[in-house]
Image (cartoon, helix red, strand yellow):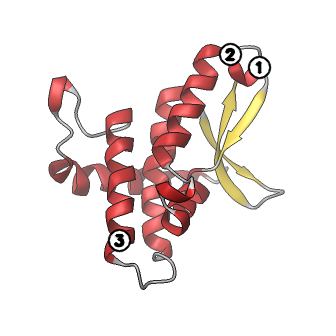
Amino acid sequence: MNEDVLQQIRANARLVIAKLGPYSGVQAGGVQFGYNRASVEYLTRLIEKLRQEDANRPEPPETLVSTLGSFFGECLAAATGGTWYLDEELGLYGIALVSPKGQKHSAFPFSKIAKQFANGVEGGDSVLGMYDIVVDALATGKMDS
């Protein structure tokens, strides 16, 4: 993966922490807004709020999807030990995941952010849902099934 792209992704993720953290309310129980489940839960609620406020907009700005996707990907990587990579066949940046038995899997955070904006939680697209499924599947070995 291009080091410049990776640095931009990480800068975007830090920007989300700096800008959204103070407003998120994620500071209870010693948990700060960052690369954790509580912050992904806030992100899910934020996307739903933005969807409602911009109901007439056909799709969110690409920069918003890119910035929030960078943050979401860093959350997935932190929770799973995954790493960023470019899937050259799909032309998408994703998180490479390796199960306890060595099976390789991928998660595509930018795509999931865009899908939640398009379909919403009620349409079956939740970044928190994806986060929970990926983290649980790796932790329990379900990805090896």
Q: Quadrant of residue 134?
A: top right
- Judged from the image, the secondary structure of the residue bearing numbered disc 1 is helix
Q: Distance between the Cα atoms at labels 3 and 2?
A: 37 Å
Secondary element type, mark 3: helix
* Residue placed most toward the observer, 19 or 37: 37
Q: Earlier in the sequence, mark 3 or mark 2?
A: 3
Image point 32% across, 58% down: which residue?
Answer: 46
Comparing labels 3 and 2, the label whose residue is closer to the camera:
3
Confirm whether residue 45 shows in the render: yes
Q: Say if residue 8 shows up in the picture.
A: no
Label 2 close to label 1 by CB (< 8 Å): yes
Q: Position of residue 47 (x, y in %)?
A: 38, 60
Badge 1 amino acid: Asp
Residue 99 lies left or right of residue 115; in this view the side is right
Q: Quadrant of residue 107?
A: top right
Drawn side of residue 59 relative to residue 45, left or right: right
- Hey, what amino acid is under mark 3? Gln
Label 3, on which residue?
52
47 displayed left or right of 108: left
Instruction: Please give the name of the residue rendered at 51% of the width and 41% of the height, measured from the top-left corner.
Output: 129
Residue occupied by mark 1: 144
Query: Which is nearer the N-term, disc 3 or disc 1?
Result: 3
Q: Position of residue 140 (x, y in %)?
A: 62, 15
74 over 15 or under it: above or below:
above
Question: Which residue is label 2 attached to?
Answer: 141
The residue most toward the right is: 89
